[in-house]
Every structure is written in structure tokens, then in C-alpha cells.
Image (spheres, rainbow, N blue to C red):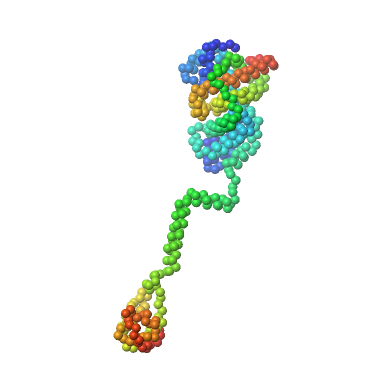
Amino acid sequence: MATDDLTLVKRVRTGDQRAFRTLVERYQRKVYAVALGMLKDREEAMDVSQEAFVKVHKYLDQFKGDSSFYTWLYRITTNICIDVLRKRKSAGGHAAEFDETIQVNLSEASAGTLGSRLGTNPQKSALRRELVEKIQAALEQVPEKHRTILLLREVEGMSYEELARTLEIPKGTVMSRLFHARAKVQKILSEYLELDESKVGIGSE
Amino acid sequence: MAHNPACERFWPELSPYIDGELDPSSRVQLERHLSACSHCSALVDDFRAEGGLIRLGLDMAADEADFTGFAQNVLARVTPERPPFFERLRISFDEFFTHHRSMVLTSVATAAAVLLVGLPIFLLQGAPQGYAGETMELQAVRVAEEAHVQPVVLEAEAEEATIIWLVDQEGPRRHDDEDFQHHVLPGASGRDAPRPKGGEL
């Protein structure tokens, strides 16, 4: 039976390097997935993932146990990613700004496309794989601050309150950005699925 | 799928509704609308599906990554290479002195004070000069013939009697033994006196 995280953390605090290695190997994929989703660059995501674990080791004494170790690790990872994104922006990197005053026209997208097209039909497994690849591409089209908040919400499960605190924005802005991010992704995927449907004639069930 | 323009006022509430962040009264109103509006209901389904796809997509991307050596690299960064023995010793001394500077200085000062005060005392071993610290060796005892002496016997700690001859000032004074003059009580004149009889001790 795998040792729980809190026990491993206690061992790491006593200098047990094997316990720390176990924690790293347990969460390296998930940390990398979050970093990749936020940064879009595989190499940078790998560097940030390592940096996250190094910081975890350094500040382990500050982990009080009031949240799960996993949540705390995620917070550290996303904070590092946010710093990287800020440095990119200040270095003149491309940061697609999204004007939130522009109303998203959800009527243009075929609503229900995703929900109805994903099911248990074996033929849809391949479609699911394609959709996954497409969603990664769609996320790249979403502006950084919207992508960040969408990933923090969907992957880390942060509450709106936590999102507002972490990103230092009002709660209303959290709701607005989430809505726009989801609407954007939904529109991109719906257009892709409509195109796909017209090409191969796959019907929805 | 056509939508009712009235739907647009509910769109901002779709996200918090999916995330469980909508207040109860707003949730009731939205659910009432969703039950009657297939378009908004479909949008809710799409938003929920997106979340699952995002998580799945990131998992698949992580599957494609190579984590060989990842943990080792992390451990190498948190566990620096052990320096050589003498270097570790030097670092230990440096750290000890840095963090216990006052204690070290106090110890050194105390040791120096002990050496400065204690060492001379140890080397001298006994009473200071002028207080019978030197052992006097009698070279000779001579008594003037005409001297009137009255011996004074002093008992020493070791029960060995010490005899001090007191020379009467009126008696002849020895002149050929300068050492003996030093044993004469102060005030004695320099009158010549014949050499007393008696041999050397």
C-alpha cells in the first residue's frame, strides 16, 4: 500500500531523501501537465516542473497540512508559471490580449456539439483523441490570462475565491474570464467538429 | 440551434453554475431557464465536456514526456555535492565562528587572562621576594670576642631552630668579612673588629 503524502512529508523533514524521491515520482506528470498547459512549451514546462519540486523541498517546513500536499504543490507550480508568463510579457513576448468588453456570441457556435459527440461509442474513441489534440491547440489560441484561469479551475479545482486571491483580481473578473475562456474553446471545438462531421459524416448520438 | 435573446442574461451565470459558485436564488432561476432552453442547456454540457477534455489532454501530453532522470535531477539540486574533508572542516569552523562569535571571543579572552596572570604565579611558586622567599645559605658564623651577644631562638615551622645572634653595638666590629656586615642589624657602625674565633659552619 502506497505511503500517504503526509507521512512522506514528515520523513522528508527528517532528511529522508528516498521519501522525497517518492513524492517527486508520484506527482511529476501532473505538475508537468499543469506547467505545459500554462506555458505551452515542453522544455520550459519541464524546467518549471523541476523548479517546483526544488521549491517544495526548500519550503517544506512551511507546509502546515491545512490543504493537501498535492494542492500545495500545484499552487507552487502555478505561481512559478505565472512568474514566467509575467517575465515573458515584460521581455516583450507575445501576449495576446483579449478585450473582455467584446461580447462573446455564443449563438454562432453550435451548442451541444461537444457534449453530444462524446460518449461511449467505440468509434468516438478516435474522435476523443482528436478532440484532445484539438483542445490543446484551442488552448493555445486563448489569451494567457484566460488560459491560466481555465487551467487553475479545471485542473487544480481552485474556488473562485482562491482564484481571485492567487491572481490578485476581483471575483467578478474571475467569473468573466472563465466564461470567455470556455466560450472561446467551445467555439473553436464546435467549428472543428462541424467541419469534421461534414467531411466524414459522423452523426451525433 | 437558435437561441432566445433573453438567454444572454443567463450566459455569465453558466460558468459559476457549473463550478458550484452560484448563489442559491440565482441557481434556482437559472435551472428554471435551463429546463426550458435547450440551447443554454447544451452550452452547459459543452462547458462541462471542455473541462474533462482539458484534463484528459494534459494527461496525454504528460504521457508523451520523458521523465527519465527527472527525479534524479531534482535530488541533485536539493542535495549539493559533498565537499572534501578539509573543506568541510573549514566550513564548519567558519560557520561555528560566525554563529558563536561572542562565545569564541570570550573564551579566547578568558584563556589569555588566565595565562597572563596564572603563568607567572605558577612559575614563581611561593612567596614573593623580600618575604623570605630566598633560601639564605649561611657561609660562616663568627662571633667577636668582645661582642656581647644574646641569642634569640626562633622556632620555625619545621621545628628547626633558627638562631639569630645579636651583636652589641659597643663591641668590636669585624672588618674583613663584608658578608657578615650584611647580617648586622641596621645602625651598626663601621668600626673594625677583630675576626671572631670559631670556624665556619
- Left or right, A177 with reference to A202: left
Total marks in image: 0
Quadrant where the C terminus of chain A lies?
Answer: top right
Looking at the image, which residue sits at the far right?
A200
- The quadrant in which residue B154 appears is bottom left
Q: Which quadrant, please, contains the N terminus of chain A?
A: top right
Expressed as whole percent of the image width and height from the top left, the position of residue A85 reads 57, 30
Name the spot of residue B20 as percent of width and height, x first: 51, 22
In the image, is residue A41 above or below residue B109?
Answer: above
* A134 and B60: which is toward the camera: A134
Give the x, y percent position of residue A82: 55, 31
Q: Is residue B49 visible?
A: no
Is A29 on the left-hand or right-hand side of B24?
right
Residue B11 appears anywhere in the view = yes
Q: Residue B118's spot in the image, x, y percent?
A: 43, 63
Q: Nearer the viewer, residue A54 or A168?
A: A168
Q: Residue at left 53%, top 13%?
A: B7
Q: Is residue B172 above or below residue B94?
A: below
Q: Up-down: is A104 above or below B116?
A: above
The residue at 48%/33% (across/down) is A66
Q: Residue at point 55% right, 27% down?
A: A152
Q: Residue at x 50, y 28 (%)?
A: A168
